[in-house]
Amino acid sequence: MDAFRCRRPALPGGALFDALPGDADPAQRAETGARIAGLLVRGARTTADEAVIGRLVRLADDHGLDLLADLWQQAPPE
């Protein structure tokens, strides 16, 4: 019978895990979504500047409200 040799586990280090594909950090995604949504809501409500309003409308037209809603849905309730 052949003797089974145990080997030490490999320690690949953080570089290996950093290189793995994956989704964005959920906490960072939630924070970003909350900040964007807050800026949009506050900016639209508190400004009379037509340029700001135009940029907000253009942002919604170009990227859609669904994208902003997807970012915002991960934010914790206030």
Image (spheres, rainbow, N blue to C red):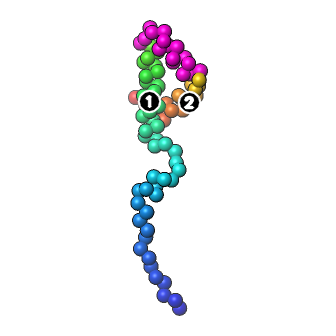
Would you place residue 68 above or below residue 23 in this image? above
Within 10 Å of disc 1 (Cα), the crowding (few <14, some 14-19, many 20+) is many
Q: Taking the image as drawn, is residue 76 in sight?
A: no
* Residue at x-position 53% and y-position 50%: 21
Front in this rendered view, residue 51 or 43: 51
The residue lying at 48 percent from left, 87 percent from top is 3
Magenta stretch contains residue 54: yes
- Above or below, 8 against 44 in this view is below
Give the residue drawn at x 52%, y 48%: 22
Q: Main secondary structure of the magenta part?
A: helix
Crowd around label 2: few <14 · some 14–19 · many ≥20 (10 Å): few
Q: Please provide the residue range marked out in magenta.
A: 46-61
Residue 10 rendering spot, x and y as whole percentages? 43, 68
The percent coordinates of residue 37 (x first, y second) are: 47, 25
The residue that disc 2 covers is: 67
Image quarter of residue 65 = top right
Q: Residue at x 40, y 29 (%)?
A: 78
Mark positioned earlier in the residue sequence (2 or 1): 1
* Front residue of 10 and 46: 10
Q: CA distance from mark 2 to mark 1?
A: 13 Å
The residue lying toward the viewer, choosing from 61 and 37, is: 61
Judged from the image, the secondary structure of the residue bearing numbered disc 1 is helix
Magenta span includes 62: no
Left or right of residue 54: residue 46: left
Circle on res. 77 = none
Classify mark 2: helix, strand or loop: helix
Q: Which residue is mark 1?
A: 34
Question: Label 1 near label 2: C-beta < 8 Å?
Answer: no
| Residue 12 coordinates in the image, percent (x, y) | 43, 63
Total numbered labels placed on residues in the image: 2
Please state which amino acid type lies under the numbered disc 1: Ala
Q: Position of residue 13 (x, y in %)?
A: 41, 60
